[in-house]
Amino acid sequence: MTTFDFWYSIGSTYSYLTVMRLPEVAEAAGLRVRWRPFNVRHVMVQQNNIPFKDKPVKTAYMWRDIARRAEGYGLSPALPAPYPLPELVFANQVAVLGADEGWVEAYTRATYRRWFEAGQRPGEAPNLSESLAEIGQDPDRVRTEAASDRIVARLAAETDTAMRLGIFGSPFFAVGEEVFWGDDRLEDAIAWATRD
């Protein structure tokens, strides 16, 4: 079974669209997905790219665009969702721990659902504790582990790897050396991964 990498950062609004449909789309295509959380905020600061801050017209467009696309996918977000996220980095540290321990997909989907459908910010209460409890993880243990130097270093290393691949936003898909940016490129990435 072919594997492709899903590079994402909890805190990316458009990643909601991918997170909520990726497992089913990949399974239908016969693909295995490797979930690769990274710190998109660091990447954007390095590139002097602040996409929506102090840009009300662009922000309004983003929320309307997500609403249209979500409707087409059968999703029901309550928009606008809280944004930006003060605990973006910590939410992704939890995701890196989940990737190491095998529960990253379940955590990411639970935390995005609470963010977009219940208005709860990822990386903080009540989203964090409720999402972790839902997937059978002990919130106190995870908070402690996710704050460890080891996980902080792992998130930094994953972010460096993403930047070396040419990743500059979220969501991104990588099939070998080929990269595809944006939820609207998911099908292109899958077609590339499944070509003969």
Image (spheres, rainbow, N blue to C red):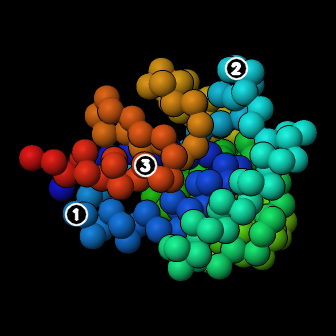
Question: Toward which corner of the image does residue 80 lie, by quadrant?
Answer: bottom right
Amino acid type, mark 3: Arg
Question: Toward which corner of the image does residue 93 lie, by quadrant?
Answer: top right
Amino acid type, mark 2: Gln
Report the Cα–Cα distance between label 3 and label 2: 24 Å
Foreground mark, 3 or 1, reads 3
Within 10 Å of disc 2 (Cα), the crowding (few <14, some 14-19, many 20+) is few
Within 10 Å of disc 1 (Cα), the crowding (few <14, some 14-19, many 20+) is some
Q: Residue at x 72, y 62 (%)?
A: 64
Location of mark 1 (residue):
30
Q: Earlier in the sequence, mark 2 or mark 1?
A: 1
Instruction: Give the SS element for disc 1.
Output: loop
Instruction: Give the SS element for disc 3.
Output: helix
Instruction: Give the SS element for disc 2.
Output: helix
Report the Cα–Cα distance between label 3 and label 1: 18 Å
Q: Residue at x 69, y 74 (%)?
A: 77
User: Which numbered circle lies on residue 46?
Assistant: 2
**Above or below, 148 relative to 177:** below
Q: Residue at x 22, y 63 (%)?
A: 30
User: Which numbered circle lies on residue 185?
Assistant: 3
Q: Residue furthest left?
A: 196
Amino acid type, mark 1: Gly
**Above or below, 150 relative to 61:** above
